[in-house]
Amino acid sequence: MQRMAMVIGIKPEHIDAYKRLHAETWPEILAMISACNIRNYSIYLKEPENLLFGYWEYHGTDFDADAAKMAADPKTQEWWDVCMPMQAPLETRKEGEWWSMMEEVFHHD
């Protein structure tokens, strides 16, 4: 199992809509997350900085392949088309990133 985390900004005028959208996440999206070996997936909001922090545990053997599978899914693409205009990627993100991946520096079970 691999723990993974990421961060992105959210436009303040979209916070309520983003919360509502995720309170009623489409069943196809939840099924695809599970099919891609992702478990214990959570997104947290930090205001007033308007940052979203995502955390999940990856239980597969090839994250890049599972991420590609998710990205190729038409329903996931539709979900992203709704979510992405609400988000504000960090200026410091790496090339090719939307959400900025984070390094784990501490963990305790």
Image (tube, rainbow, N blue to C red):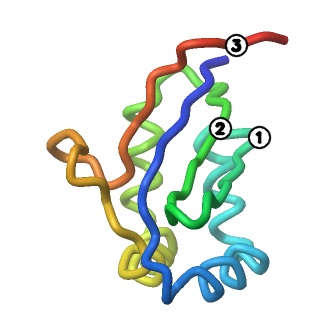
Work out whether 75 lies above or below 52: below
N-term-proximal mark, 3 vs 1: 1
The residue shown at (84%, 12%) is 109
Q: Nearer the viewer, residue 91 or 32?
A: 91
Choose the circle earlier in sequence order: 2 or 1. Answer: 1
Please state which amino acid type lies under the numbered disc 3: His
Residue 22 located left or right of residue 61: right
Mark seen at residue 56: 2
- Residue drawn 43% across and 43% down? 67
Disc ID at residue 107: 3
Three-letter amino acid code at the position of disc 2: Trp
Q: CA distance from mark 2 to mark 1?
A: 5 Å
| Place of residue 23 in the rendered image (x, y in percent of width and height, measured from the top left) | 78, 76
Which residue matches tag 1? 40
Return the x and y of residue 1 as percentages of the image width and height: 67, 17
CA–CA distance in space, label 3 to label 1: 15 Å
Mark 2 / mark 3, whichever is N-terminal: 2
Q: Nearer the viewer, residue 58 or 43?
A: 43
Helix, strand or loop status at disc 2? strand
The type of residue carrying mark 1 is: Asn
